[in-house]
Amino acid sequence: MCSPQEFGMNAWSARMLTRSRSRGPGAGPRRCGEEPEPLRRGEAAAERRKSHSSMKHQRKARRLCVAYEGSDSEKGEGAEPLKVPVWEPQDWQQQLANIRAMRSKKDAPVDHLGVEHCYDSSAPPKVRRYQVLLSLMLSSQTKDQVTAGAMQRLRAQGLTVDSILQTDDATLGKLIYPVGFWRSKVKYIKQTSAILQQRYGGDIPASVAELVALPGVGPKMAHLAMAVAWGTVSGIAAVDTHVHRIANRLRWTKKATKSPEETRAALEEWLPRELWHEINGLLVGFGQQTCLPVHPRCQGCLNQALCPASQGF
């Protein structure tokens, strides 16, 4: 236990330490009996404002620091943005490479008789575009060879908007026969030609929306017309029965599709846009030569081991 003298000395030391701390950091020792010099009224107010501002700044800095650290931890320095996974078929790139290899000779009917080969390349641009659209209208439900023959007969008569409007229906029917649904196509060709003359000066529209508004022109024709006539890739062009069949056999659609138009929409969801212009010609020729509607030639197909449908034939 402490003696009374020691206890008194400790109490005196504690009081001196308390007084020293109350004067604030950096204050020198005060001599015994010295009283602190009071601040003047203006100086006291300034000290209070300075103290209040300092405390407010410290609280704000702490809040900002916490918010910054929280945001930084969420984002992470150098972190990449999240990518939404996109569905794509299994092995499609290898399947496409194999189809390119099988189509390297470019000797299918579509390579020489397709609609993009049926117009007069020496005609004025406006006439060429009209001939492209007309060949597309004739090609529906018709083989390429038959469409090419009808276009050849029409061009021999002078194939322009004016010449078609001056041709009677019976003569026009004879020229385009035996394309599929030739009677309906005579009516559609006449109606569309009249609209082109009245609204577009004999040219064809430069948008899919305007093209599909023409009689006898569907989305498949419109997208191919944009690609061939205007040089604009607006979608996967001319998804016909060949493309529809092959895409479902290779499982290039997330689920089975029931129509070529449904297949076109399904392919556009995942197929890279730079392949849209190429894919139609590749698959049509592949369907004409190898992946036939009935009795496909799976034994000679490079995709036999990768094709989910090959085991069923």
Image (cartoon, helix red, strand yellow):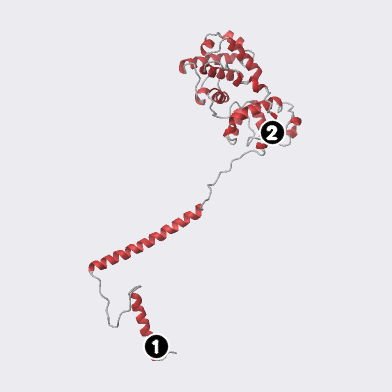
Q: Disc 1 or 2, which lies upstream in sequence?
A: 1
Q: Residue furthest front?
A: 122
Q: Position of residue 111 (x, y in %)?
A: 65, 23
Q: Which one is in front in this view, the residue at disc 1 or the one at disc 2? A: 2
Q: Position of residue 85 (x, y in %)?
A: 58, 43
Identify residue for label 1. 7
Identified by mark 1, the residue type is Phe
SS at badge 2 = helix
Q: Residue furthest right?
A: 299
SS at badge 1 = helix
> Horizontally, is 107 left or right of 6 in the view?
right
Identified by mark 2, the residue type is Asn
The reply to whether callout 1 and callout 2 are in contact (CB within 8 Å) is no
Q: Residue at x 69, y 31 (%)?
A: 101
Q: Residues within 10 Å of mark 2 (few under 14, many from 20)?
A: some
Q: Position of residue 212 (x, y in %)?
A: 53, 23
Above or below, 276 relative to 188: below
Looking at the image, which is closer to me, 265 or 161? 161
Which quadrant is home to the C terminus?
A: top right
Per the rendering, the mark at residue 162 is none
Work out how far the residue at label 1 is from the one at label 2, CA to CA, in angstroms: 100 Å
Identify residue for label 2. 98
